[in-house]
Amino acid sequence: MKTKKPARKLRPIFKGRKAKTGLPPGSPVHIGESRTGAVEVELVRYDEASLDERRINTVSECVNLKGMPGITWVNVDGVHDVDILKSVGDCFGLHPLVLEDIANTDQRPKMEEYEGYIYLVCRMLSISKSGEIASEQVSVIIGPGFVLSFQEEEKEGDVFDRVRDRIKANKGKIRKMGADYLAYALLDSVVDNYFDVLETFGERLDDLEEAVVGAPTRETVREIQALKKEMVFLRRSIWPLREVISGLLRSETGLIADGTHIYLRDVYDHTVHIMDTVETFRDMLSGMLDIYLSSLSNRMNEVMKVLTIIATIFIPLTFLAGVYGMNFKYLPELELHWGYFAFWGICFATAVGMIIYFKRKHWLN
């Protein structure tokens, strides 16, 4: 069995909510893990013939791109700076409740329709170098000719790099389609990464299954419990995503073109497949726990069987030793010259006879 992976530490759900107590609705307050890094804002504007990609210092640079031909994608790495969120909201006319939800990083995956745009939330999952599940909230806003994406933290490399590479290389349809297709591509990258996470879990389950069937220990049951907790977290992150995609398919805002529906249905099928895999893994873990308990019971039964056989063999020997160990003066066999050897011969024959009898009854198998 490989080195035990540490269990994911679930962060407190209500961490940071005290700061929001008493504030009016729509007041953006960062809720989640405390972060102090700089917020990075990336701007990508493209059409079929041109591409403009750069880091921007002020959100006001996006104002000049509003209404221009092509697609504008603004990606914000870091939601702990509410001033930048307000600037983005002012630039693109976002509702204060949307900004409040973006700053709250403990949102359940969901989709909401507003006048002129669609707001959706999902979880970006990955496996860290230490083997833990790295979870990050991603908020995406789909508008006419623009897409806004908000990630919790700035880091080198994420699942959106695949989309960036396709835009740079002008591969596929992404530079020929609208903002809805870009949003689909981002959502598809998030969902595809779930398969990588589940593949890692599948390998851990294979190792765990070998340990359970072979020589289970207390560490084995701890690993089972840790994986069960992580499966619960995965289910909570993935299950509502089906509702999000289904909502996009039913959207009547006109922001989702008919030609994008077929791609969204493909992502929906992927989420169903992922959920089936998660449920299968949960059943396997429950089965492993049952196997572990059965294995412990079988090992205990084997020990009890051996002890019972030993005790059964010594019962008649103890009886013989007890008879000839009595302090009566006249025991005929005590004065025989070969009495001592006869006693051991009878004991040996009795023990061998009982063992042969047990074997014929298949009690020693």
Image (spheres, rainbow, N blue to C red):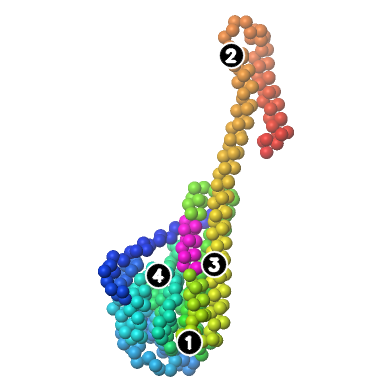
Left or right? Give the position of 317 relative to 2. Answer: right
Q: Which stretch appears magenta?
A: 226-239
Q: Residues within 10 Å of mark 3 (few under 14, many from 20)?
A: some
For the view shown, which residue lies furthest in the right direction?
360
Instruction: Determine whether 119 is above or below 7 in the image.
Output: below
Q: Disc 1 marks which residue?
A: 254
Q: What is the three-letter code of the residue carrying label 4?
A: Gln
Describe residue 342's horizontal placement relative to residue 167 as left or right: right
Reply above or below: 138 against 215: below
- Residue 287: quarter of image: bottom right
Main SS, magenta region, reads: helix
Residue where numbered disc 2 is placed: 325
Reply yes or no: does residue 82 show up in magenta.
Answer: no
Q: Residue at x 67, y 36 (%)?
A: 364
Label 1's element?
Answer: loop
Distance from disc 1 to disc 2, alpha carbons, whole Å, reads 102 Å
Residue 282 seen in render = yes
| Mark 3 lies on residue | 275
First reached walking from the N terminus: tag 1 or tag 4: 4
Report the quarter where the N terminus lies.
Answer: bottom right
Which quadrant holds the C terminus? Answer: top right
Determine whether the residue tagged by mark 4 lies in a helix, strand or loop. Answer: loop
Amino acid type of disc 3? Met
Q: Earlier in the sequence, mark 2 or mark 3?
A: 3
Instruction: Tell me the kind of residue under disc 2.
Output: Gly
Residue 258: x and y in percent read 54, 86
Q: Residues within 10 Å of mark 1 (few under 14, many from 20)?
A: few
Q: CA distance from mark 1 to mark 4?
A: 26 Å
- The answer to which quarter of the image holds residue 13 is bottom left
